[in-house]
Image (tube, helix red, strand yellow):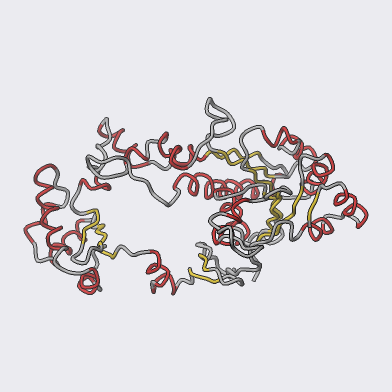
Amino acid sequence: MTSPLAGVRVLDLTRLLPGSVCTLHLADLGADVVKIEDLAGGDYARSLGVPAEAAAGSVSAFYSIVNRNKRSLALDLKQPTGRAAFLRLAAKADAVVESFRPGVVDRLGVGYGEVSVLNPRVVYCAISGYGQDGPYRERAGHDVNYLGYAGVLDQTGTAGGPPALSNLQIADLLGGSVDAAMAILAALFDAQRSGRGRYVDVAMADGALAHNIFPLHMLEMRGSVAPRGSDVLTGGAPCYGVYATRDGRYMAVGALEEKFWHELCDLLERPHLRAKQFATGPDGETVRSEIASLFATRTQREWVERFAGADCCVTPVLALEEALANEQFRARGMIVESPRGCRQYASPFKLSDHRFEIRRDAPAQGEHTEEVLREAGFTSAEIAALSGAGAIRG
């Protein structure tokens, strides 16, 4: 079996989450991803949450999870010899991915302009908060900021309450990771046909805005979006939401289609609610209150058993530990263990004639420096000179 991206070389200048998850997807699909790290701390995701008293060489689970199947080369891009070494590597690479603020790679002399002259086929992807142009291009930001600007945060939460935060980084992962990986793959495909690469400009704020689809639908259809917590998907309709159980757990109800709602009403022995699926205002509150009272009479486990086999989109709200043990995810092979014993998620892509595997654990800083340089044609003398100049670490 051949991995779909076998033979594709990616130079990864990113760190932390969005860029690392982007290149993780590429690595899991078979690309040779080489992390280019500075000689100081490198990717500081390694130490995220690691206690000061931990053994030397200890790395965070976060770093291990998002950097498997990659290699690491420690290189000082601020030194002329380090910059020259990077450009020599980039001249033969298929893609470069960076996540600095706009302009940083150009000041270092390793931007798209320099690389594309040496390698016209290269796909050069820049992941940033607000993109390479526009008045916010140099602003700092995090997921919460991008979601705030994109109108996503304003719609998230309960009626009368503040915007709700999520520990699933929507803009970072959707806009910064998945969008970037998709655009890189499209550009790589075109480069195979045309012989010309492309510059890929990915903004996490853009990604959040571009996927904020349902509120835009409401705005275009009705002239305004519903207040937070009153939209169909945020608590405005009895047929969609979460309901507390007797033991303080929750059940998720997603009975948006009429047939699902009718079956739910029948299972709850409340046929009079069949016509109240999208009830709003006081009437909707009455329906929701009646359903909430019913769910509060049994434990979550009892409701799971009651709805077993029912076709109405009612499921338990699981804690992560329970999700990792869930039979569906287990059957899909979604929970794997790295060679060092760290639980991880398998690639979510299932491709025929391609089997996901952890080919190598997340690399130590500079673990593959000499190996990568030799593959690129550097001689022992050249590697020694780079080391002597303090431009590399292996």
Q: Quadrant of the C terminus?
A: bottom right
Residue 284's x, y, as percent? Answer: 13, 47
Q: Quadrant of the N terminus?
A: bottom right
Q: Is residue 257 left or right of residue 391?
A: left
- How many numbered marks appear? 0
Q: Residue at x 9, y 50 (%)?
A: 286
Q: Quadrant of residue 162?
A: top left
Which residue is farthest right?
381
Q: Nearer the viewer, residue 281 or 164?
A: 164
Residue 188's x, y, as percent? Answer: 65, 49
Q: Quadrant of residue 77?
A: top right
Q: Nearer the viewer, residue 258 or 125?
A: 125
Q: Is residue 380 left or right of residue 305?
A: right
Q: Quadrant of residue 67?
A: bottom right
Q: Is residue 264 left or right of residue 92?
A: left
Q: Residue at x 88, y 50 (%)?
A: 388
Residue 268's x, y, as percent? Answer: 13, 65
Q: Residue at x 54, y 71 (%)?
A: 337
Which residue is farthest left?
272
Residue 301's x, y, as percent? Answer: 24, 72
Q: Nearer the viewer, residue 366 or 219?
A: 366
Which residue is farthest front?
53
